[in-house]
């Protein structure tokens, strides 16, 4: 069969899990503007819009890579999305990239919240404003639940039984038994790393 008649490889460019090998890393200004847009659109939390922009829109990371970096940032002290901006920017453009992403994430909402804080201090006792904030909080919870399901999808596709047990164990320890987060992490992190190491050796063998 000639090369001209060979069947064409299926196109999968629409899949966010596919690594964009030819993609050029964004510049410092592009990083700043991208995270500025995320922060300005991030009603209910920036995580939803950060994943959409990084994984689906710009394809700077695959879904698995985003989950791995977010998992790392989740175990570091400080706000998760702030940690993510620093780690993500530094990974693409070094320290300068981390600073650009960090500045883009925090500068616009800081300016806006300063103005809103002044307004709230003056009109915060208005009943209509309280009802509006209550409605916004419901929408924020919905956005958070939506992004959790989207982030869990690539994990559930290849979830191992041991990994499922670890995940449920952490959920029960923190969400149900209300154990201290620090103690749960001190146990869960080494157990998870050791389990992943042993599973990787088993697959390699």
Image: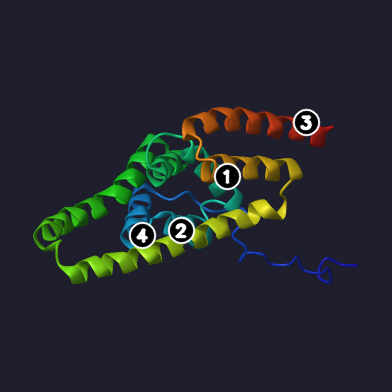
**Separation of marks 1 and 2 at Cα, in angstroms:** 16 Å
- Decide which of 125, 144 is in the foreground and name it: 125
Residue position marked by numbered label 1 in the rendering:
171
**Separation of marks 1 and 3 at Cα, in angstroms:** 27 Å
Residue lying furthest left: 122
Horizontal placement of 35 versus 74: left or right? left
Residue 87 position in % (x across, y down): 44, 39
Residue mark closest to the camera, 1 vs 3:
1
Q: Is residue 135 above or below residue 58?
A: below
User: Dividing the picture into quarters, in which one does residue 89 lie?
Assistant: top left
Q: Residue at x 20, y 68 (%)?
A: 129
Residue position marked by numbered label 2 in the rendering:
144
Q: Secondary structure at mark 3?
A: helix
Residue position marked by numbered label 3 in the rendering:
201
**Separation of marks 3 and 2 at Cα, in angstroms:** 35 Å
User: Dividing the picture into quarters, in which one does residue 165 lie?
Assistant: top right
Residue mark closest to the camera, 3 vs 2:
2
Quick check: can you spot residue 138? yes
Mark 1 or mark 2: whose residue is earlier in sequence: 2
Residue 21 position in % (x across, y down): 60, 51
Q: Is residue 69 above or below residue 124?
A: above
Q: Residue at x 75, y 34 (%)?
A: 200
How busy is the neighbourhood of tag 2: few (under 14 within 10 Å), some, or many (20 plus)?
some
């Amino acid at each position: 069969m000639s090369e001209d008649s060979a069947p064409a490889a299926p196109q999968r460019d629409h899949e966010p899990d596919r690594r964009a090998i030819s993609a050029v890393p964004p510049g410092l200004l592009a990083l700043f503007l991208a995270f500025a847009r995320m922060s300005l659109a991030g009603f209910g939390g920036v995580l939803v819009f950060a994943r959409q922009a990084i994984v689906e829109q710009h394809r700077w990371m695959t879904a698995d890579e985003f989950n791995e970096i977010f998992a790392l940032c989740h175990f570091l002290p400080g706000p998760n999305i702030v940690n993510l901006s620093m780690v993500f920017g530094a990974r693409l453009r070094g320290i300068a990239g981390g600073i650009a992403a960090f500045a883009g994430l925090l500068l616009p909402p800081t300016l806006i919240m300063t103005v809103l804080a002044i307004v709230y201090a003056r009109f915060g006792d208005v009943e209509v404003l309280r009802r509006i904030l209550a409605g916004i909080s419901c929408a924020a919870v919905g956005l958070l639940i939506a992004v959790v399901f989207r982030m869990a999808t690539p994990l559930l596709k290849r979830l191992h039984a041991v990994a499922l047990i670890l995940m449920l164990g952490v959920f029960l320890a923190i969400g149900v038994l209300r154990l201290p987060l620090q103690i749960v992490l001190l146990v869960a992190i080494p157990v998870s790393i050791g389990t992943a190491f042993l599973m990787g050796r088993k697959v390699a063998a």
